[in-house]
Amino acid sequence: MKVAIVHYWLVGMRGGEKVLEALLDLYPDAVIVTHVYDPAQVSSRVRRHEVRETFIGRLPGAKKHYQKYLPLMPLALELMDMQEFDLVISSESGPAKGVIVRPDAVHISYCHSPMRYIWDHYHVYRARAGRLARLMMPLAAHRLRIWDVTTAARVDHFIANSSFIAKRIEKFYRREAEVIFPPVDTAEFAVSPEVGGHYLLAGEMVSYKRADLAVEAFNASGRKLVVVGDGEMREALERKSGPNITFLGRVPFAELKQQFATCKALVFPGEEDFGIIPVEVMACGRPVIAYGRGGALDTVIEGVSGVLFHEQTADSLNDAISRFEEEPGLVADPEAIRELAKGFDTAVFKEKFSAFAARALDRA
């Protein structure tokens, strides 16, 4: 059986690329198809495989400015010859599922999210775009939506990375999706006997992750907050932060794990597709205070592994933190939280995906 894994672009190692690594473990002879490939930015596990780029990868500046070529990506996918492959797995967040496969081949799409920038986050992205992009986006996004919905019919089976994404797939594509949570290497993390007096905010500082909400809440309460990560909003947030908020920027993995294990709790104020960082923090036995929408509803269990707040306001977040502090028995002990996190381990993902693919191939 010849297998291809179509991944939107390979220019870094984030959650989607961790899924790709797990799929490559399941299918060690798989060929990777992608729009743009930068070997220096990916892991050795990815580099060991044959990687085929679409013509997007040969365009000027594609490694850094690949998103500007988004309107050309549907054509680029359809020009790729996929006739040799019996099983095609598309890793979908940007354009990936639109490849044309043989009639007897099986196409499984593991969907991290339908493209946010043409669906529910379209107006946010357009508001942040430059003047020329704002003028061009309506026509380009309109055509991409038509193509995106049409290509959903080319997929035999959808898998969603969370219950939230399964609902978005049903909303935009009118297709059902089985939920298989993305892999988290829980063995990399451990419970620490020492816990500090600070809360933690971690991740990329972009608008939809709502780091600004956390800064506003902690400015108001005076509680200690450590911020790990970087992004377009960091400079503005640092300027408005009080002395109780410390920005560390990007840190080595060893230090990141230490921060996870020693914080009082992770603050997770955005609406995420899934959210791997909360699970990693839970694998360290620490609770999560999360906005009660999106992927957090699959991972943060109220009264067990954390506390949920239900309005994206500083007051609502501070009320949740106060409940967490004033009711010591509100969340479980660290070992119980870690045990819950193990349900999202890489081994669980591999077992469930392998079984799903076997059933799909049997039906075919």
Image (spheres, helix red, strand yellow):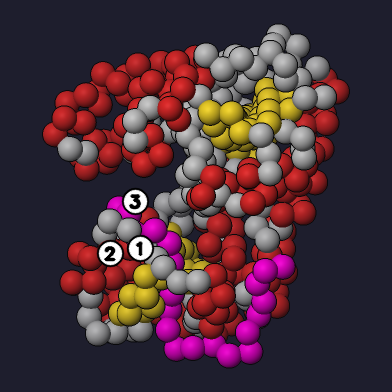
* Mark number, residue 230: 1
Q: Are marks 1 and 3 in contact (CB under 8 Å)?
A: no
User: Is residue 320 visible in this depiction of the protein?
Assistant: no
Pinpoint residue 252: horizontal percent, then vertical percent.
Answer: 50, 71
Q: Is residue 125 left or right of residue 262?
A: left
Residue, disc 2: 234
Task: Report the front residue among 5 and 326.
Answer: 5
Q: So how many labels did they put on this image?
A: 3
Dividing the picture into quadrants, the one containing residue 310 is bottom left
The magenta region covers: 187-207
Q: Residue at x 61, y 33 (%)?
A: 51
User: Is residue 358 visible in this depiction of the protein?
Assistant: yes
Element under label 2?
helix
Pinpoint residue 14: horizontal percent, then vertical percent.
Answer: 52, 52
Q: Residue at x 77, y 35 (%)?
A: 29
Query: Outermost residue toward the right?
Result: 362
Q: Amino acid at mark 1?
A: Asp
Mark 3: give few (<14), some (14-19) or many (20+) Cα within 10 Å.
some
Q: Is residue 300 left or right of residue 308?
A: right
Q: Amino acid at mark 2?
A: Arg
Mark nearer the N terminus (2 vs 3):
3
* Mark number, residue 208: 3
Mark 2: give few (<14), some (14-19) or many (20+) Cα within 10 Å.
some
Q: Residue at x 28, y 39 (%)?
A: 125
Pinpoint residue 101: horizontal percent, then vertical percent.
Answer: 65, 15
Q: CA distance from mark 2 to mark 1?
A: 6 Å
Dividing the picture into quadrants, the one containing residue 163 is top right
Above or below for 213 versus 50: below
Q: Is residue 11 left or right of residue 45?
A: left
Element under label 1?
loop
Above or below for 110 versus 105: below
